[in-house]
Image: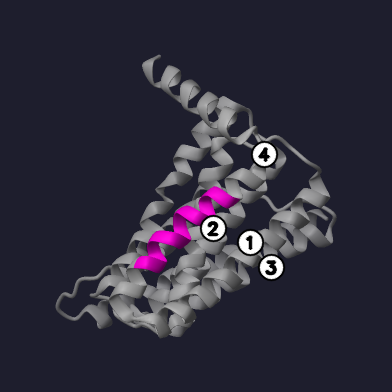
Amino acid sequence: MANEAFIQRLLLRYNVLSKRKLTYSVRLVDLMVAVPTTIVIWHAYGLGKTIRYLAGLSLALSAQRAFLSGMIHKIGTEQSSLADALTLSRGANGAVLAGLMTSGIRDRKGVAGWIGWLMPLFGVTDWLDGTLARQAGPTRLGGVLDIEADSWLTLWSAAGAVAWGNLPRWCLLPPIIHYLEPLLALMQGKLPEGGGRWWYRMIGASQMALLIVALAPINWKQRKQILTALSLPVSIGQCAAIIVLLVRKLQKS
């Protein structure tokens, strides 16, 4: 009961500040992500790397906003809540990783490595925004944002894990072909949706666990060999699961 009361107060406070407008959530999340990471990278790596970081970050955030605008146009305007802000933060974390990719910084055990590792770790808000959404009232837009924010974060986590985490390039394949799912849904006039059976969610969780381990700013004996050995069955399993899900959706259409 105490937790529920706290959540209700938190939601009420956020609703008053934001006036339940999604634009407030977008601007707040962008500022909270862009400002501190830019300052830290500038201090650690200099102006040139920072400009390249900001270029990638800005492009990724712009892509998120374009997707968001498209979904609002398709669904219609809905009232925003704190759950949407947390969901958007996961997408913004993916944008930070995109910025690190374009910066050219490959410093897994340094400042950039710690930033890159923390971004997927902050994805634990996934369980929290679901709780908040149930309290505030779930929306169609919130459901779409939830799954696509996870996909965006996974894609750029995989890119980072390949670029500076010693994972083989085939680990990029599952998060890339995953985008066939929302593409198929949109082509059928539907909205992208998440979920799936327990085995599908378990395989997805194993993929993210592998990425987090690869991005971790620590070394251990035979690190590259172990990661490579683990990545093959995880990547094959994830690709197979996506293909099975796509075939079933095509059969139902």
What residue lies at 70% left-to-right and 53% top-to-bottom? 192
* Residue 64, numbered label: 1
Depth check, front residue: 199 or 175: 175
Position of residue 178 measured from the top left corner of the image (x, y, whole percent):
61, 66
Sort mark 3 into few (<14), some (14-19) or many (20+) by Cα contacts within 10 Å: some
N-term mark: 1 or 2: 1
Give, as a three-letter code, the residue at label 1: Gln
Task: Find residue 79 and report its image quarter.
Answer: top right
Q: CA distance from mark 4 to mark 1?
A: 17 Å
Mark 4 burial class by Cα count in 10 Å: few <14, some 14-19, many 20+ = some
First reached walking from the N terminus: tag 2 or tag 3 = 2
Mark 2, residue position: 91
For the point 37% across and 16% down, which residue is it?
2
Looking at the rendered structure, the kind of residue marked 4 is: Lys
Which residues lie in the magenta part? 27-39
Of callouts 3 and 1, which one flags the residue occurring earlier in the amino acid sequence? 1
Residue located at (38% from left, 60% from top): 36
Q: Viewed as shown, does residue 204 lie left or right of 179?
A: left
Give the Cα distance between marks 3 and 4.
30 Å
